Amino acid sequence: MVIDEIIKKYKTLESSDRELLIEVRNKLDDTITLIDVMLFQLNEIEEHTLELQKELESLRRYTRKIQKKQKGEEHE
């Protein structure tokens, strides 16, 4: 299996290579954590955007309603 091969290679690495590999793994872990946080934030932004779109559409309907009412008053 691929995992077995990786473990064999890891065991044969020199100490400095192991430390470098651990450092790289830690940086990858940090990167993955950062990506997770950014995805969470993106999801929050998307939810807020949808709420704002709904509110904007509601305001547009209200504005059209007022405009129709004003036009009706002008014709009287």
Image: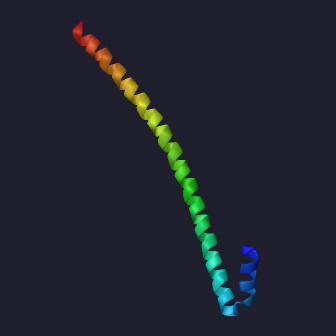
Query: Residue at position x 55%, y 49% from top?
Result: 44
Is 71 positioned to the left or the right of 50 in the image? Answer: left
Query: Residue at position x 57%, y 62% from top?
Result: 35
The image quadrant where one finds the N terminus is bottom right
Query: Residue at position x 23%, y 9% from top?
Result: 75
Is 67 positioned to the left or the right of 32 in the image? Answer: left
Instruction: Locate residue 15, reporting x and y percent.
Output: 70, 92
Residue at the left extreme of this rendering: 75
The image quadrant where one finds the C terminus is top left
Comparing 47 with 6, the one in front is 6
- Coloring scheme of the render? rainbow
Query: Residue at position x 65%, y 83% from top?
Result: 21
Query: Compared with residue 27, is residue 48 higher up or lower down, i.e. above or below?
Result: above
Instruction: Locate residue 56, reporting x and y percent.
Output: 41, 34
Residue at the front extreme of this rendering: 1
Comparing 67 with 11, the one in front is 11
Is 76 positioned to the left or the right of 20 in the image? Answer: left
Query: Compared with residue 63, is residue 36 higher up or lower down, i.e. above or below?
Result: below
Instruction: Locate residue 72, reporting x and y percent.
Output: 28, 11
